[in-house]
Image (cartoon, coloured by chain):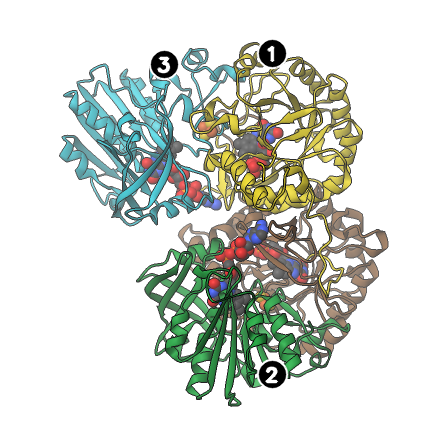
Chain colours: A cyan, B green, C brown, D yellow
Amino acid sequence: MPEEMATTSHAGVYATRVIERRELAKDVVLLRLDAPGLAEATRPGQYVMAIPPSGEAAATALAIYEAEGKRISLLFFIMGRRTQELSALGSGDCLSMLGPLGNGFDCSGDPRDAAIVAGGVGIASVLLCAQALLRARARVRLFYGARTRELVVDAQRFRDAGCDVIVTTDDGTLGMQGMVTDALALAPEPDMIFACGPTPMLRSVARIAADRRVRAQLALEETFGCGVGACWGCVVALAGDSMQAPNFPGAARGGSDIAYARICREGPVFWAHELRW
Amino acid sequence: MPEEMATTSHAGVYATRVIERRELAKDVVLLRLDAPGLAEATRPGQYVMAIPPSGEAAATALAIYEAEGKRISLLFFIMGRRTQELSALGSGDCLSMLGPLGNGFDCSGDPRDAAIVAGGVGIASVLLCAQALLRARARVRLFYGARTRELVVDAQRFRDAGCDVIVTTDDGTLGMQGMVTDALALAPEPDMIFACGPTPMLRSVARIAADRRVRAQLALEETFGCGVGACWGCVVALAGDSMQAPNFPGAARGGSDIAYARICREGPVFWAHELRW
Amino acid sequence: MVRPSLAVRLGSLELAYPTLMGSGCYGSGAEYAPFADLSKVGAIVLKSVTRAPRLGNAMPRLVHTPAGMLNAIGLQNPGIDWYLERELHKYADRPCKIIGSVAGFSVDDYAFVCERLAARDEIAAVELNVSCPNVDREGATFGCDASLTASVVRAARATTTKPLIVKLSPNVTDITAVAREAEDAGADALGVINTVRGMAIDVERWKPRLANISGGLSGPAIRPIAVLAVYEVAQAVKIPIVGQGGIETVTDALEFFLAGAAAVSIGTANFTDPRIPQRIVEELETYLARRNVASLSEIVGKANVAFSTPHQYEGDEG
Amino acid sequence: MVRPSLAVRLGSLELAYPTLMGSGCYGSGAEYAPFADLSKVGAIVLKSVTRAPRLGNAMPRLVHTPAGMLNAIGLQNPGIDWYLERELHKYADRPCKIIGSVAGFSVDDYAFVCERLAARDEIAAVELNVSCPNVDREGATFGCDASLTASVVRAARATTTKPLIVKLSPNVTDITAVAREAEDAGADALGVINTVRGMAIDVERWKPRLANISGGLSGPAIRPIAVLAVYEVAQAVKIPIVGQGGIETVTDALEFFLAGAAAVSIGTANFTDPRIPQRIVEELETYLARRNVASLSEIVGKANVAFSTPHQYEGDEG
Ligand SMILES: Cc1cc2nc3c(=O)[nH]c(=O)nc-3n(C[C@H](O)[C@H](O)[C@H](O)COP(=O)(O)OP(=O)(O)OC[C@H]3O[C@@H](n4cnc5c(N)ncnc54)[C@H](O)[C@@H]3O)c2cc1C
Ligand SMILES: Cc1cc2nc3c(=O)[nH]c(=O)nc-3n(C[C@H](O)[C@H](O)[C@H](O)COP(=O)(O)OP(=O)(O)OC[C@H]3O[C@@H](n4cnc5c(N)ncnc54)[C@H](O)[C@@H]3O)c2cc1C
Ligand SMILES: Cc1cc2nc3c(=O)[nH]c(=O)nc-3n(C[C@H](O)[C@H](O)[C@H](O)COP(=O)(O)O)c2cc1C
Ligand SMILES: Cc1cc2nc3c(=O)[nH]c(=O)nc-3n(C[C@H](O)[C@H](O)[C@H](O)COP(=O)(O)O)c2cc1C
Ligand code: FES
Ligand code: FES
């Protein structure tokens, strides 16, 4: 990613307040929060580290789903203890968080025909990106893959915003049956790809992008520890020619033919060609 | 305690439902629960082991505060993780529990002038006892001690029921300043004492009872593990002549001049003279 | 497909379910009978018994800690004589197997108690709790020394042909060394792990929170420690392993089976909810059926395959 | 009363606050600067550095577990040369002390890195991370062997007069034996404890959840283990102890001080909330003021008094 994107100068600890909690589906929660300061500073593809109100577990990495005025929203799936705890929050409750974090998507460069690929919880990372592209008058196709029908959440939100939405499910209960990358491979070529989802999905996206010589930005999701670059728990291997690039200051540290960059600090968004698959 | 009291034949796992949650004071919560089966079987001085809804910690020992019709209530102070979690329950939520457990107070024998002594959270164990005594037309004086004014909760409930309520606080912010046992020692002699509170308080009650030759029943509170007699984590030393008593079947096991009984199984209520202080 | 089989064998001990109720956590079973279906349990391991009666430690004996608890009961028990005369016959009609647990403070103690206990029909197998101090050697814990452990196992082995389960202490530099010695000395199975030593302090009273100062840590907090111990011991020995330490759900139990345990033991989780053991066997059946596995034994140790990724690097922890 | 003093000394190292930010958990401090006031921190312990650059382990490197986490970073670092040339000067203007951490795979490695690191003014003290495998002895972990630990300490001691903190591994039968040897070999202070070995398994994919298979367990789950280690080590040595393992609140920190730690280290809790270190020092002041204690040093080790109750019995755990 361009270096200027890597600075998160507004990053800080913000005390936010829940103004609405909605269950979009079983075990899928949308929290709308009053977050002055944080909301205004947010760029597409950035995330927060949500501090557990009980103080009893590590903070949780969550994409900033929406950011408008002084408000943001978080969209998350209940996966374990920490998302369980966050799901218990209700209107009026406080939630502190570190943010906005990460470099975010580069929505400049005027893509005319953008493809956004989202798998599972990856959907939470791409709404702001879609909105920015639409504002820049790009055509935006959303390829949205999920395991099953119930896990396709808030697709309408993207349609209302002006995206063409192509849904795939592993079990065929909604949209095309198969993997979201199958749908991408079959579709007419975009001039830029933005993707967020599990690593195997991103690997496919990278392959498709390379085959078609389309530039692709990938938002990676791995288990985070600190979320701020301090623990080196969240690395990704760089392609040989990215290793010494100035935007990966820590990356060359391995001293071998592989170099790792921190997903939380140098990412979470990388150009597909920057990574070694 | 008489042996017949030691059987808890209705004990089982009950799925209850919260019908009301009230905060009686900061960090003091009253949960009213629909608990058919459990409510009807409850005797004064019994408790439940409340299963944490998250399944992530040991069950919590809580006295059955009220039992009427098919409903019970629990009154608890937020002390740590587990009571914190229980305090997050709201109307409609499910709460499973083991109960009713323990032998309970013996309210038979027609005491005419009963003194109930409650310290801190001990208050939750004595309302049903007070009600039973009042129904049997005894005079009931409640000696209620707390650290400070805010921690004197629901005293009015006892007054409304017909008790004389004597309050003490450590800091003198409400009622008499001093320990609740000081108030007991100064008051006219009752013909039976019922007490629940921290062990040092119960030790004083036992001494006062012995001095005045008044019989006293003490409900003990120590950290429980299993709450059902399986782990031997909650013992109390028996007086020499109680060691071989048939109502303490497990107690003689130590094989020394001290014998331990399980508070959860052989208690939580003991006659003061049964214990070695 | 047919219902998956959950039956397991530990030496000659056959269990319908792969779930033992941990020693010291389940009484004799009677205490939990109102709350749990004992016929859905593999076996109950009784509280450890010693040669002489033991009063146990002073109170407090328990402290709740993050995702776990510390206990220092101090092996309170009436001694083997009282136990055999007045207790054991009551356990004969349990709808599941009963395993005796023996603790001692000398090699001779173990042999003495083991012989008497094993002579009884109520007892299907004997577990050796070697997490006790050895009075003959300045209190060194038996289970913290491979050769001491071996002596205990050999002495016990000589007294009985009943299956012997040796329950290993995790408080050692290398648990596999102790495991191998226990196997060589004649153990039929290994319990992995007993509690981890720990302590908590009351910061208002400036005193340890347990009367015994230190205690044994159990519950989910120690699960990662226990899973690794099972994984490593499974590669060091051929005899079956009873995995334990913080099992609360079927997922937790599966971690142990995949690490190499033939059976699991459930202790502290009973204090959370006595329905947990039954829930685990039910969900284990569902899990195996979903994955088309006919028998639990097929998945034992299946995570013992080196992980490999494109950029695997032989590093270490830290 | 006057404001209680929180200043502590570890050998010749003087700290305004008794809180170290644990190695590998706080980067170089810059990463946390937007979220925490570094001037309210005693010292930052840098990520361990080795002689040669290390790529570290493959992903995944982290797993969240009950009340804790497992990590297997694999000591990723650019090696001491790059570190000294291109990194260290950036840390010179931190508003708190900086402690270097050294890891190695031979005694010589430690001496080599220690000498170079200690030559730099940015470094106020050196911590030795001995939880590494020794390549010369079939991978035995230095910190799991008292005499190996002593060799490392002696070699490091010979290279520098800067304060040396030796960070002990809990994965041993007797941590006090290692502690004593480290003291005799010239350590100025002891870090107690590093992470506990553990493992987690992915029950859907039948694979370890860490690429490295095993990892180090940290967080509140290990606190009782750490408190006991500090309590026991404090009675075995005279040099100050830096207590660590699962500290999240002032109460947790107080457990360590009362057990015998002169200072504490905060690692994983920063991942929960970076405001925790500052909150702890503030609440520590309040606590001491409330109890009329003029200086933190007065309460160090104050729980090292045998508990006594009317019916105390010298039993054991279990
Ligand atoms: C930059 C970034 C942004 C993110 N944004 C979002 C977002 O917007 N929305 C969202 O929902 N998520 C998002 N995530 C993912 C989210 O952070 C994780 O899902 C979260 O950490 C879950 O925490 P938890 O404690 O609830 O679950 P955990 O307990 O951490 O569990 C996580 C997963 O591990 C599995 N697991 C646990 N134990 C085992 C076991 N023994 N065997 C096998 N599997 C096991 C669980 O089933 C679950 O799938 C994001 C992640 C990153 C890195
Ligand atoms: C038979 C019986 C009946 C009971 N009935 C009631 C009732 O009706 N209502 C009620 O409110 N309670 C009752 N109790 C007490 C209740 O069970 C306990 O308060 C409960 O276990 C608290 O659980 P917790 O997890 O919330 O707190 P825990 O985490 O278990 O903490 C309990 C106490 O330990 C303290 N503590 C924790 N760590 C430390 C430390 N490091 N240093 C010093 N102190 C520390 C906490 O501050 C707190 O005071 C009863 C107990 C028994 C045995
Ligand atoms: C209160 C308590 C008492 C215990 N008593 C014994 C005992 O007498 N003998 C023994 O071998 N293990 C004893 N244990 C250890 C358990 O059997 C089990 O091995 C350990 O707690 C780890 O498993 P868990 O986390 O499932 O409890 C005891 C554990 C607890 C919590
Ligand atoms: C992600 C991570 C990385 C760590 N890296 C190191 C390290 O490089 N060197 C070291 O001595 N300790 C390392 N540690 C151990 C911590 O410094 C600390 O001693 C341990 O985690 C226990 O404290 P805590 O529970 O407060 O985290 C690491 C811990 C974590 C969680
Ligand atoms: S999560 Fe700690 S460096 Fe990325
Ligand atoms: S709490 Fe287990 S025996 Fe009483």
Give the distance between the C-alpha atoms of the residues marked 2 and 1, in whole angstroms.
80 Å
Q: Amino acid at mark 3?
A: Glu
Q: A249 and A187: which one is in front?
A: A249
Where is mark 3, residue-wise? A3
Q: Which residue is mark 1?
A: D81
Q: Secondary structure at mark 1?
A: helix
Q: Within 10 angstroms of label 1, few (less than 14), some, or many (20 or more) residues?
A: some
Disc 3 chain ID: A
Residue C37 visible, this angle: yes
As drawn, the residue found furthest toward the bottom would be B110
Local SS, label 3: helix
Mark 2 C-beta closer than 8 Å to ligand 2: no
Q: Nearer the viewer, residue B190 or D145?
A: B190
Q: Is residue D116 left or right of residue A151?
A: right
Q: Looking at the image, can residue D140 be seen? A: no
Q: Nearer the viewer, mark 2 or mark 3?
A: 2
Q: Is residue B266 left or right of residue B128?
A: right
Would you place residue C318 above or below residue D108 in this image?
A: below
Give the Cα separation between the discs numbered 2 and 3.
81 Å
Residue shown at 71% from the left, 69% from the top? C77
Q: Amino acid at mark 1?
A: Asp
Q: x%, y% of residue A145?
A: 27, 36
- Residue at the spot x=15%, y=34% of the render? A159
Give the number of the disc on residue A213: none
Q: Which mark is residue B215?
A: 2
Determine crowd level at label 3: few under 14, some 14-19, many 20+ residues with C-alpha closer than 10 A: few
Q: Are marks 2 and 3 in contact (CB under 8 Å)?
A: no
Mark 2 or mark 1, whichever is nearer to me: 2
Q: Which quarter of the rendered image does ligand 6 occupy?
A: bottom right
Marks 1 & 3 on one chain: no
